Amino acid sequence: MTNADILFQNANLPAAPLSDILVRDGVIAAILPAGGMAAEGRPTVDIGGRLLLPGFVEGHIHLDTSFYGDDWVPHKPCTDGFDVHERVRFQAENMADAAPMIDRARNQIELSIAQGSTRMRSHVMVDGSVGLASLETVLAVRAEYRDLIDVELVAFPQSGILRSPGTDRLLDEAISLGADVIGGLDPASFDRDPQRHLDVVFGIAERRGVPVDIHLHDGGSLGAFTIEEIIARTEATGLQGRVAISHAYGLGDLAPDAARRLSARLARAGIAIMTNAPGAHAFPPVALLRAEGVTVFSGSDNIRDSWWPYGDGDMLGRAMMIGYRSGFYTDAELEAAFDVVTYGGAKALGLADYGIEAGKRADFVALAAAHVPEAVVAVPHQRAVYRAGRLVAENGRVIR
Ligand SMILES: [Zn+2]
């Protein structure tokens, strides 16, 4: 026993009898049937038979662009159907009037922690218009909250790479400054030159040894073509297992046979797919992708920003949305939706110390549900969130 021991008692773990968990220095040291270990003067936390889940993985968020906690910003529709360029323009106009970014990013990160996320990947705008200023702000917020949540940052060229002069150099500098992942944006439709766009993204990934996460909104055959190009680049650079495509709407437009063929290629290249089961949009076939061996993960993406008014940072609620939109009804399907917001995210982000088992970090969410399928459909809001064995949020309030 050390001073850093904590005994979590009476935890209802998925697929296990009622359990006690010994946590040492923030790491799970042992899991035993309830009552199997004497407290012996250790501090104890009685989970009281509630369901104990691994901390959620918020795999795709934008900490720099949300207006959560700020004045309500009414959504402005595009002039003629969805247009990424026009939305980027609306965003720049809205950001000029918004509260300071550091306050908005704090609001949003606290929301995510309170909802039970203990790991996060945030994209942050890096381009000719904002330079590295947004990244510097979000890096400061990451440092401020580093004992409450792990945050990985993606250098995200929101205004394209080729269309926004100097962005290639800024993206490279962003990695020096502390960004962990290199991003991209619709290489074909936004920059109109997928090869040169991908040259920059994969060039930085190779040179800097960082993973890749590309926003790809393009649907239909243009989306499928771009996915094929990303597969080819991933294999050519030996980055298997370190590349993700966010949204990949095009996968949702393909006929099942074509989707299966492309999914098998994604699985071979170790490319993960991020989906947030967006509104009325076509989105990737989650069950088909998983059946082919593709890692599927999720994120809130935009929370009350210039892109849409929705979002509450709740990854359990996101699992419900993924299940709902995917037509998941059986317990196995509901568990698959839950896997997307937990273990799928951990795999996509390469988190080796994730999960409820000995040797992994003690990141837990305790809530009132009998099992995972019930948690996914009921989305209980009363939660206790632990990071490395320490209570960091309870019932919607962050504890610092
Ligand atoms: Zn995004």
Image (cartoon, grey):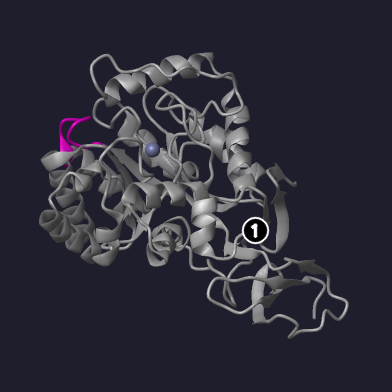
Relative side of 91 to 160, left or right: right
Relative depth, front residue between 315 and 240: 315
Q: Quadrant of ligand 1?
A: top left
Q: In which quarter of the image is residue 347?
A: bottom left
Residue in the image at 51% along x and 29% along y: 66
Looking at the image, residue 361 lies above or below residue 277: below
> As rendered, which of 329 and 153 lies closer to the eye?
329
The reply to whether the magenta stretch includes residue 194 is: yes
Q: Is residue 280 left or right of residue 96?
A: left
Is residue 46 found inside the magenta-colored segment of the image? no
Residue at the spot 73% in from the left edge and 86% down from the top edge: 36
* Rendered location of residue 170, percent (x, y): 38, 34
For the point 43% across and 23% down, the residue is 306
Which part of the image, by quadrant, shows the N terminus? bottom right
Asked whether residue 293 appears in the rendered view, the answer is: no
Decide: few, some or many residues near mark 1? Use Cα within 10 Å; few <14, some 14-19, many ≥20. Answer: many
Amino acid type indicated by mark 1: Ala
Residue 334 percent location from the top left of the image: 42, 60
Instruction: Using the image, determine if residue 106 lies above or below residue 95.
Output: below
Residue linked to disc 1: 368
Residue 254 in view (yes/no): yes
Segment tinted magenta in the rendering: 186-195
